[in-house]
Image: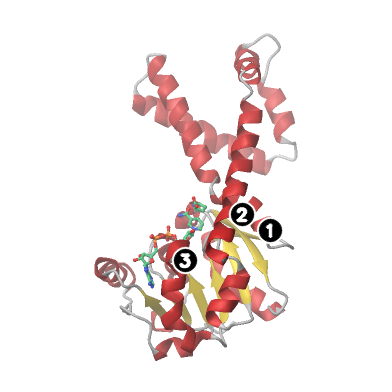
């Protein structure tokens, strides 16, 4: 596939993860445009990627086939206004949480819009991004989006835009749930007399190993859990304690709270 010209509006964490992956996969840096108003971040982009970032939108955006929106949702309207004169013909790809595609269409005048919900393991090429395409998006557009995101990890298309709120709650925010669990494991390690570093090593190796086992095994996570749980043994004691504390229900309530907040963000910024 020929390499498209891609413009990023916002050159922060998420954009940098995607730019890093693109460059590694052979995208020529001269076909990347980044609009980034924060000077120290422009200097960093230059140092890390050899890119020259623009301080503000200009007519060079008109040469981009793909416009990638990677600003905070609160700043989208402000960021979009100066870009709008140049970008209506391009395919739009937004990673912004809570900016609905209708809002993007209104702000840019573009019809072809894909929304993505990535997650931070994208930084090491092990993310997963949920994707939603408006009906105007062509199969070639979808292939381009997959090509651009491939270096950051897996992709998963959803049929309805509202499904992205669930994706946000599962995999967008999910890394934070996992880190929270690891933090709690590390605190327990210290309480049990191990050092924090020993706790970190044991907790992370266990979680990484368990995740890899679950991915590679043909058995369900429930069956794999049962295999660890000897009757009357230590795991049984721990899982019974979790069950008595309603841990599964607490996780389900937390994920629903994230989904609800994603909906609210859409209402807030789509008005
Ligand atoms: N961090 C995460 O786990 C995830 C973040 N996202 C979404 O990605 C988007 C970007 O997030 P991050 O990269 O973490 O934020 P960030 O704050 O690292 O990057 C945003 C960048 O936009 C720049 N910016 C501010 N005003 C601008 C303007 N008017 N024009 C152009 N650029 C402007 C900022 O200087 C900053 O460098 C957000 O909308 C967020 O919802 C999506 C999935 C996961
Ligand atoms: O917390 C947030 O709103 C963003 C979206 C998913 C991860 N971070």
Residue 263 circle label? 2
Front residue of 19/216: it is 19
Asked if disc 1 and disc 2 are in contact, CB closer than 8 Å, the reply is yes
Residue farthest along the top direction in this orientation = 232
Closer to the N terminus: mark 1 or mark 3? Answer: 3
Q: Identify the residue shown where x is 62% and y is 75%.
A: 113
According to the image, label 3 marks what residue?
18
Which of label 3 and label 2 is nearer to you?
2
According to the image, label 1 marks what residue?
162
* 194 w.r.t. 41: above or below: above
* 205 w.r.t. 55: above or below: above
Query: Picture quarter containing residue 253?
Result: top right
Quarter of the image for the N terminus: give it: bottom right
Q: CA distance from mark 1 to mark 2?
A: 8 Å
The spot of residue 238 in percent (x, y) is 60, 16
The spot of residue 212 in percent (x, y) is 60, 41
**Does ligand 2 reach within 8 Å of label 2's beta carbon?**
no
């Amino acid at each position: 596939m020929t390499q498209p010209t891609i413009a990023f509006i916002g050159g922060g964490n998420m954009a940098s993860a995607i730019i890093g992956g693109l460059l590694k996969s052979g995208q020529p840096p001269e076909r990347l445009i980044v609009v980034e108003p924060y000077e120290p971040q422009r200097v960093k982009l230059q140092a890390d990627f050899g890119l020259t970032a623009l301080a503000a939108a200009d007519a060079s955006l008109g040469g981009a086939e793909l416009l990638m929106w990677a600003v905070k949702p609160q700043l989208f309207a402000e960021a979009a206004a100066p870009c709008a004169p140049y970008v209506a013909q391009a395919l739009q790809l937004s990673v912004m949480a809570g900016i609905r595609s209708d809002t993007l269409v209104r702000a840019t005048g573009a019809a072809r819009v894909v929304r993505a919900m990535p997650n931070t393991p994208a930084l090491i090429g092990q993310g997963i991004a949920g994707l939603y395409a408006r009906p105007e998006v062509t199969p070639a557009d979808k292939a381009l989006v997959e090509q651009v995101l491939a270096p950051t990890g897996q992709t998963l298309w959803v049929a309805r835009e509202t499904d992205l709120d669930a994706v946000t709650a599962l995999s967008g925010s999910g890394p934070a749930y996992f880190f929270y669990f690891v933090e709690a494991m590390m605190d327990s390690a210290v309480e049990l007399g191990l050092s924090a570093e020993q706790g970190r090593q044991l907790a992370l190796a266990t979680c990484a190993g368990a995740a890899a086992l679950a991915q590679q095994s043909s058995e369900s996570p429930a069956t794999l859990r049962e295999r660890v749980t000897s009757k009357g043994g230590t795991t049984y004691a721990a899982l019974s304690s979790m069950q008595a504390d309603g841990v599964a229900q607490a996780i389900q309530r937390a994920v629903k709270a994230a989904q609800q907040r994603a909906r609210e963000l859409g209402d807030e910024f789509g008005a």
